Image (spheres, rainbow, N blue to C red):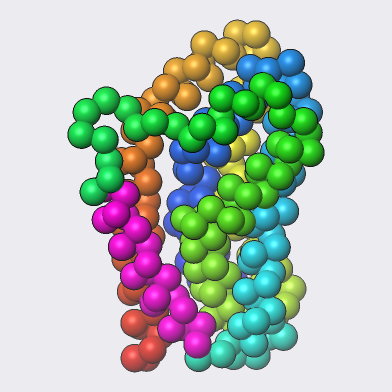
Amino acid sequence: MGSAIGAVLPLALGVALSPIPIIAVVLMLATPRAGVNGTSFLLGWLIGLSVVGTIVLLLSGGSDGSAPARWVDVVSLLLGVALIVLAGLQWRRRPRSGTAALPGWMASIDRFSPLTSAGLGLALSAANPKNLLITVGAAAAIAETGMSPGGQAVTLGLFVLLGTLGPAVPPAIYLGLGARSQRILGRLRGWMAAHNTAILCVLLAVIGLKLVGDGISALVG
Protein backbone atom coordinates (compact mmCIF):
# COMPACT_ATOMS: atom_id res chain seq x y z
CA MET A 1 0.00 0.00 0.00
CA GLY A 2 2.92 2.32 0.67
CA SER A 3 3.93 2.42 -2.99
CA ALA A 4 0.35 3.15 -4.06
CA ILE A 5 0.06 6.01 -1.58
CA GLY A 6 3.34 7.42 -2.83
CA ALA A 7 2.07 7.20 -6.41
CA VAL A 8 -1.16 9.09 -5.75
CA LEU A 9 0.22 11.81 -3.46
CA PRO A 10 1.46 14.11 -6.26
CA LEU A 11 -1.74 13.49 -8.20
CA ALA A 12 -3.85 14.43 -5.19
CA LEU A 13 -1.77 17.59 -4.84
CA GLY A 14 -2.53 18.43 -8.47
CA VAL A 15 -6.26 18.19 -7.78
CA ALA A 16 -6.07 20.04 -4.46
CA LEU A 17 -4.27 23.05 -5.96
CA SER A 18 -6.85 23.69 -8.70
CA PRO A 19 -7.22 27.50 -8.69
CA ILE A 20 -10.79 27.84 -10.03
CA PRO A 21 -12.48 25.65 -7.36
CA ILE A 22 -10.58 27.45 -4.60
CA ILE A 23 -11.61 30.85 -5.99
CA ALA A 24 -15.23 29.63 -6.26
CA VAL A 25 -15.27 28.58 -2.59
CA VAL A 26 -13.78 31.92 -1.52
CA LEU A 27 -16.53 33.75 -3.40
CA MET A 28 -19.19 31.54 -1.77
CA LEU A 29 -17.86 32.46 1.66
CA ALA A 30 -18.61 36.12 0.97
CA THR A 31 -22.33 35.41 0.43
CA PRO A 32 -25.20 35.23 2.97
CA ARG A 33 -25.25 31.41 2.61
CA ALA A 34 -21.52 31.08 3.16
CA GLY A 35 -21.52 28.12 5.53
CA VAL A 36 -24.13 25.91 3.89
CA ASN A 37 -23.02 26.63 0.32
CA GLY A 38 -19.35 26.05 1.14
CA THR A 39 -20.19 22.74 2.81
CA SER A 40 -22.42 21.70 -0.10
CA PHE A 41 -19.65 22.49 -2.57
CA LEU A 42 -17.16 20.32 -0.68
CA LEU A 43 -19.69 17.47 -0.50
CA GLY A 44 -20.22 17.60 -4.25
CA TRP A 45 -16.45 17.74 -4.78
CA LEU A 46 -15.91 14.64 -2.61
CA ILE A 47 -18.65 12.72 -4.42
CA GLY A 48 -17.26 13.62 -7.84
CA LEU A 49 -13.73 12.42 -7.09
CA SER A 50 -15.01 9.27 -5.38
CA VAL A 51 -17.34 8.28 -8.21
CA VAL A 52 -14.75 8.76 -10.96
CA GLY A 53 -12.08 6.86 -9.02
CA THR A 54 -14.43 4.00 -8.16
CA ILE A 55 -15.57 3.58 -11.77
CA VAL A 56 -11.97 3.37 -13.01
CA LEU A 57 -11.08 0.78 -10.35
CA LEU A 58 -14.08 -1.34 -11.29
CA LEU A 59 -13.26 -1.17 -15.00
CA SER A 60 -9.57 -1.87 -14.46
CA GLY A 61 -10.07 -5.53 -13.66
CA GLY A 62 -7.94 -5.18 -10.56
CA SER A 63 -10.66 -4.26 -8.10
CA ASP A 64 -10.80 -7.86 -6.84
CA GLY A 65 -7.12 -7.86 -5.93
CA SER A 66 -5.96 -9.54 -9.15
CA ALA A 67 -3.51 -8.02 -11.59
CA PRO A 68 -5.01 -5.04 -13.44
CA ALA A 69 -5.83 -5.18 -17.11
CA ARG A 70 -2.97 -4.30 -19.47
CA TRP A 71 -4.90 -1.38 -20.89
CA VAL A 72 -4.58 0.39 -17.55
CA ASP A 73 -0.89 1.00 -18.31
CA VAL A 74 -1.77 2.30 -21.77
CA VAL A 75 -4.38 4.61 -20.28
CA SER A 76 -1.81 5.97 -17.82
CA LEU A 77 0.57 6.73 -20.68
CA LEU A 78 -2.12 8.39 -22.80
CA LEU A 79 -3.39 10.43 -19.86
CA GLY A 80 0.13 11.71 -19.26
CA VAL A 81 0.47 12.77 -22.88
CA ALA A 82 -2.96 14.44 -22.75
CA LEU A 83 -2.00 16.43 -19.65
CA ILE A 84 1.25 17.61 -21.22
CA VAL A 85 -0.62 18.70 -24.37
CA LEU A 86 -3.22 20.45 -22.22
CA ALA A 87 -0.44 22.28 -20.37
CA GLY A 88 0.96 23.48 -23.67
CA LEU A 89 -2.44 24.68 -24.88
CA GLN A 90 -3.09 26.50 -21.60
CA TRP A 91 0.27 28.25 -21.84
CA ARG A 92 -0.27 29.32 -25.45
CA ARG A 93 -3.67 30.77 -24.54
CA ARG A 94 -2.38 32.66 -21.51
CA PRO A 95 -3.08 36.41 -21.44
CA ARG A 96 -0.08 38.39 -22.69
CA SER A 97 -0.70 41.05 -20.07
CA GLY A 98 -2.85 41.31 -16.98
CA THR A 99 -4.91 38.60 -15.27
CA ALA A 100 -6.89 35.98 -17.16
CA ALA A 101 -10.65 36.48 -17.11
CA LEU A 102 -12.49 34.26 -14.65
CA PRO A 103 -15.50 32.15 -15.75
CA GLY A 104 -18.68 34.14 -16.19
CA TRP A 105 -20.70 31.92 -13.84
CA MET A 106 -18.70 33.25 -10.89
CA ALA A 107 -20.67 36.49 -11.10
CA SER A 108 -23.83 34.63 -10.03
CA ILE A 109 -22.36 32.68 -7.09
CA ASP A 110 -24.13 34.98 -4.61
CA ARG A 111 -27.44 33.56 -5.91
CA PHE A 112 -26.44 29.90 -5.65
CA SER A 113 -28.53 27.51 -3.58
CA PRO A 114 -26.96 24.63 -1.61
CA LEU A 115 -28.01 22.24 -4.38
CA THR A 116 -26.43 24.42 -7.05
CA SER A 117 -23.25 24.69 -4.99
CA ALA A 118 -23.08 20.91 -4.61
CA GLY A 119 -23.61 20.53 -8.36
CA LEU A 120 -20.79 22.96 -9.03
CA GLY A 121 -18.46 21.01 -6.76
CA LEU A 122 -19.42 17.80 -8.54
CA ALA A 123 -18.84 19.35 -11.96
CA LEU A 124 -15.49 20.92 -11.12
CA SER A 125 -14.16 17.66 -9.67
CA ALA A 126 -15.63 15.06 -12.02
CA ALA A 127 -16.28 16.93 -15.27
CA ASN A 128 -13.41 19.42 -15.36
CA PRO A 129 -10.95 17.97 -17.92
CA LYS A 130 -7.85 18.54 -15.79
CA ASN A 131 -9.23 17.00 -12.60
CA LEU A 132 -10.94 14.21 -14.51
CA LEU A 133 -7.70 13.17 -16.19
CA ILE A 134 -5.73 13.34 -12.95
CA THR A 135 -8.33 11.34 -11.01
CA VAL A 136 -8.43 8.67 -13.71
CA GLY A 137 -4.64 8.56 -13.58
CA ALA A 138 -4.68 8.18 -9.80
CA ALA A 139 -7.20 5.35 -9.94
CA ALA A 140 -5.15 3.66 -12.67
CA ALA A 141 -2.03 3.94 -10.48
CA ILE A 142 -3.92 2.31 -7.62
CA ALA A 143 -5.19 -0.47 -9.89
CA GLU A 144 -1.67 -1.20 -11.13
CA THR A 145 -0.63 -2.29 -7.62
CA GLY A 146 -3.01 -5.27 -7.65
CA MET A 147 -3.88 -4.62 -4.00
CA SER A 148 -6.89 -6.12 -2.27
CA PRO A 149 -10.22 -4.30 -2.67
CA GLY A 150 -9.90 -2.97 0.86
CA GLY A 151 -6.43 -1.57 0.20
CA GLN A 152 -7.57 0.04 -3.03
CA ALA A 153 -10.57 1.61 -1.29
CA VAL A 154 -8.38 3.04 1.48
CA THR A 155 -5.87 4.45 -1.00
CA LEU A 156 -8.60 5.98 -3.15
CA GLY A 157 -10.16 7.47 -0.03
CA LEU A 158 -6.83 9.03 0.90
CA PHE A 159 -6.49 10.48 -2.60
CA VAL A 160 -9.98 11.98 -2.37
CA LEU A 161 -9.33 13.51 1.04
CA LEU A 162 -5.97 14.97 0.01
CA GLY A 163 -7.50 16.25 -3.23
CA THR A 164 -10.08 18.13 -1.17
CA LEU A 165 -7.56 19.97 1.00
CA GLY A 166 -7.28 22.92 -1.40
CA PRO A 167 -11.00 23.76 -1.59
CA ALA A 168 -11.31 23.00 2.15
CA VAL A 169 -8.72 25.60 3.21
CA PRO A 170 -10.95 28.68 2.68
CA PRO A 171 -13.84 27.27 4.77
CA ALA A 172 -11.35 26.35 7.51
CA ILE A 173 -10.02 29.93 7.51
CA TYR A 174 -13.59 31.25 7.51
CA LEU A 175 -14.64 29.11 10.46
CA GLY A 176 -11.48 29.84 12.39
CA LEU A 177 -11.32 33.62 11.93
CA GLY A 178 -14.91 34.63 11.21
CA ALA A 179 -15.23 38.18 9.83
CA ARG A 180 -11.47 38.66 10.02
CA SER A 181 -11.03 35.97 7.38
CA GLN A 182 -12.36 38.14 4.54
CA ARG A 183 -9.10 40.04 4.10
CA ILE A 184 -7.06 36.83 4.00
CA LEU A 185 -9.50 35.14 1.65
CA GLY A 186 -9.56 38.20 -0.60
CA ARG A 187 -5.79 38.10 -0.93
CA LEU A 188 -5.89 34.36 -1.60
CA ARG A 189 -8.50 34.85 -4.31
CA GLY A 190 -6.48 37.62 -5.94
CA TRP A 191 -3.26 35.62 -5.92
CA MET A 192 -4.91 32.48 -7.32
CA ALA A 193 -6.64 34.50 -10.05
CA ALA A 194 -3.43 36.31 -11.01
CA HIS A 195 -1.39 33.12 -11.25
CA ASN A 196 -4.13 30.75 -12.43
CA THR A 197 -2.52 29.90 -15.77
CA ALA A 198 0.98 29.43 -14.40
CA ILE A 199 -0.24 27.16 -11.59
CA LEU A 200 -2.26 25.04 -14.00
CA CYS A 201 0.53 24.68 -16.54
CA VAL A 202 3.11 23.60 -13.97
CA LEU A 203 0.76 21.10 -12.37
CA LEU A 204 -0.35 19.64 -15.69
CA ALA A 205 3.20 19.31 -17.02
CA VAL A 206 4.66 17.73 -13.88
CA ILE A 207 1.82 15.26 -13.39
CA GLY A 208 1.72 14.48 -17.12
CA LEU A 209 5.42 13.61 -17.11
CA LYS A 210 4.91 11.40 -14.08
CA LEU A 211 2.08 9.47 -15.72
CA VAL A 212 4.05 9.06 -18.93
CA GLY A 213 7.02 7.71 -16.96
CA ASP A 214 4.82 5.33 -14.96
CA GLY A 215 3.07 4.10 -18.10
CA ILE A 216 6.30 3.46 -19.99
CA SER A 217 7.87 1.67 -17.00
CA ALA A 218 4.85 -0.61 -16.61
CA LEU A 219 4.63 -1.42 -20.32
CA VAL A 220 8.31 -2.28 -20.78
CA GLY A 221 8.77 -3.86 -17.35
Picture quadrant where residue 86 is located: bottom left
Q: Looking at the picture, how far across and down is residue 91, in whole percent?
A: 26, 47
Question: What residue span does the magenta drawing correspond to?
Answer: 71-91
Side (left or right) of 66 relative to 101: right
184 or 79, nearer to the observer: 79
Q: Write the residue at 46% across / 79% down.
A: 75
Side (left or right) of 90 relative to 45: left
Side (left or right) of 125 relative to 19: right
Image quadrant in which the C terminus is located = bottom left
Q: Looking at the picture, how far across and down is residue 117, in whole percent?
A: 71, 36
209 or 59, nearer to the observer: 59
Image quadrant in which the N terminus is located = bottom right
Q: Looking at the picture, how far across and down is residue 118, in whole percent?
A: 73, 41
Visible residue check, residue 4:
no
Picture quadrant where residue 77 is located: bottom left
106 or 190, nearer to the observer: 106
Picture quadrant where residue 218 is located: bottom left
As for residue 112 lying within the magenta part, the answer is no
Magenta span main SS: helix
As for residue 89 lying within the magenta part, the answer is yes
